[in-house]
Amino acid sequence: MQVSIIIVNYNTKVITNNCIDSIISKTQDIEYEIILVDNGSTDGSKEHFEQRDDIKYIYSLENLGFGKANNLGNQHATGEFLFILNSDTILIENSIKILKDFFEINESKLNIGVLGAVLCDENLNMINTAGSFPQIKFYISDYLNLFFKTKYKTYKKISFSDITKVDMVSGADMFLRRKLFNEVSGFDEKFFLYFEETDLQKRIVNLSKINYITNQTKIIHLEGASSKVNNWKRKIIQDSQTLYFRKNDSKNFLKYVFFELLCSPIRFLNSNYSFKENISFFKNNINKLL
């Protein structure tokens, strides 16, 4: 098997089904398997996907989160390469073959770790495709510059050439050798959601590998279609950010803790959430910091 495509589903039956159908429709001249890991969906996903004989369907009785679910998928993979693909993506061309061929042709010369395509919206306008590794000093400075309303973004707009070196590829479409994924022990399962792909690629870069985006192919990413903004999500993002900084910027972590303790009360003024939700976020954040 050449490529194992791993998709994680959580109550997104329709968009996941569309993603799978686009893979089957557009992928040619390559051996591949589709592994769908279902994080305990209750929207009829199980009844639907377990009837498909063109995928490997793995149903978990609990929501494992993104990283742990992908690790589970990897246990069932047989491909030389892994293509970790979000359920809210749509292939519009033979992207998997293009990525695989590009990877093999350029791997030795470029020392490729993770390779990604250019991500676009439904109108083929480029969206978050790659970005820089987060650093505490930039997080703090951007927060202060906005009077305690952070504009900090991991991802940034880049004009991609044929091949562009990046710190990290979007977690929506990561193409890499399965051997390398196993060498770094896959995703750190302490991350439930968010920053897990950043942490994974940081460990890959620490092995002297380099991550790239190629503009030879585009993939539609329906950003946000598989998740909704709420206080739970806000807490998960903050928890994962704290864990990432604790692991990967340890020399500055005390500065981060001090800054968060100083600024946490300001979050009570966030009018997007109720006072009760802001209290809950504050308590959770303090608990994770200390």
Image (cartoon, rainbow, N blue to C red):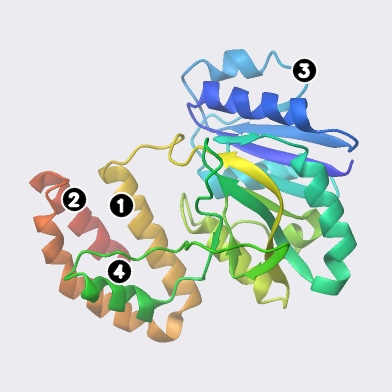
User: Quick check: marks 3 and 4 in contact, CB under 8 Å?
Assistant: no
Q: Is residue 85 visible?
A: no
In this picture, residue 169 sits left or right of residue 154: right
The answer for how far apart the CA atoms under marks 1 and 3 are is 38 Å
Rendered image: mark on residue 53: 3
Q: Position of residue 160 (x, y in %)?
A: 63, 62
Query: Which residue has dot 2 on it?
Result: 280
Query: Which residue has dot 4 on it?
Result: 289
- Tell which circle, 3 or 4, labels the residue nearer the N-terminal end: 3
Of the pair 70 and 134, the residue shown nearer to us: 134
- Tell which circle, 2 or 1, labels the residue nearer the N-terminal end: 1
The answer for how far apart the CA atoms under marks 2 and 3 are is 44 Å
Q: Is residue 77 above or below residue 204?
A: above
Q: Is residue 49 visible?
A: yes
Number of numbered callouts drawn: 4
Query: Which residue has dot 1 on it?
Result: 235
10 Å crowding of disc 4: few (<14), some (14-19), many (20+): some
Q: Quadrant of the N terminus?
A: top right
Identity of the residue furthest to the bottom in this view? 251
